[in-house]
Amino acid sequence: MTQTHKHPEHQTLPNNILLEKWADIGFHWQGEIAISEMPRLSEQTVGAGALSVVADLQKTDGVLWLNYTVTGAVDVGCQRCLEPMSFDLSGAYRLALLQSEDEIAKTDGEEFVLIDELGESARRLLPIKELLEDELMLALPLSPRHDDCDLLIESVGDEIEEEESENPFAALAALKGKFS
């Protein structure tokens, strides 16, 4: 079993961690993250709030895994009534961090990301907070709506009167009678 070293308590989750330092010894962080600390997630939500997060980085069977356990909800805007609605982001998020495509078979179909795709500096500085934000963004509903949302529609009148339209072929029928 790999021993995991804890990040100093009472500090915010760092934006980046030194991959060369933490990849072999493991990394653990636990605390609260304000939604405002994640700008892209903040743009998709309404109001403020915080999520409880446990982040672990550990190597298992030669694969580097980044695990997040999130507890909490965010408010998003209902696409029908535009009122805020709570959406629970609680769950476990697991992501394999791979050095090359040759390691994909070791993930057993779980989600993965190639470290080189994270940017030039990712082999040295792992963007741990940005990866968490990515996972949370993917968990948000594409078009959030209350289950019992009543779209407010004002009726213009009691009944909609249908206009009788002329038959577009009536002119052809009249011509047919003239030429036959």
Image (cartoon, rainbow, N blue to C red):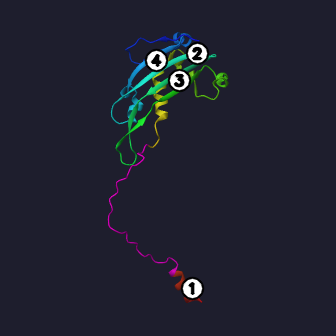
Q: CA distance from mark 4 to mark 3?
A: 12 Å
Labelled disc at residue 118: 3
Badge count:
4
Give coordinates of residue 172: x percent, y percent.
54, 81
**Which of the two marks, 3 or 1, is nearer to us in this view?**
3
Q: Earlier in the sequence, mark 4 or mark 2?
A: 4
The span picked out in magenta is: 144-170
The amino acid on which the numbered mark 1 sits, given as a three-letter code, is Lys
**Neighbours of disc 2 within 10 Å: few (<14), some (14-19), many (20+):** many
Give coordinates of residue 26: x percent, y percent.
53, 13
The amino acid on which the numbered mark 4 sits, given as a three-letter code, is Asn
Mark 1 near mark 2, Cβ–Cβ under 8 Å? no
Secondary structure of residue under mark 4: loop
Residue that badge 4 annotates: 16
The amino acid on which the numbered mark 3 sits, given as a three-letter code, is Leu
Q: Earlier in the sequence, mark 3 or mark 1?
A: 3
153 is within the stretch colored magenta: yes
Q: Specify the quadrant of the image occupied by residue 20.
A: top right
Residue that badge 2 annotates: 59
Q: CA distance from mark 1 to mark 4?
A: 81 Å
Residue at image point 67% right, 25% down: 105
Q: Earlier in the sequence, mark 1 or mark 2?
A: 2
Mark 4 near mark 3, Cβ–Cβ under 8 Å? no
**Which of the two marks, 4 or 3, is nearer to us in this view?**
4
The amino acid on which the numbered mark 2 sits, given as a three-letter code, is Lys
Mark 3 near mark 1, Cβ–Cβ under 8 Å? no
Q: CA distance from mark 3 to mark 1?
A: 73 Å
Looking at the picture, tell me which residue is in the foreground, 163 or 136.
Answer: 136
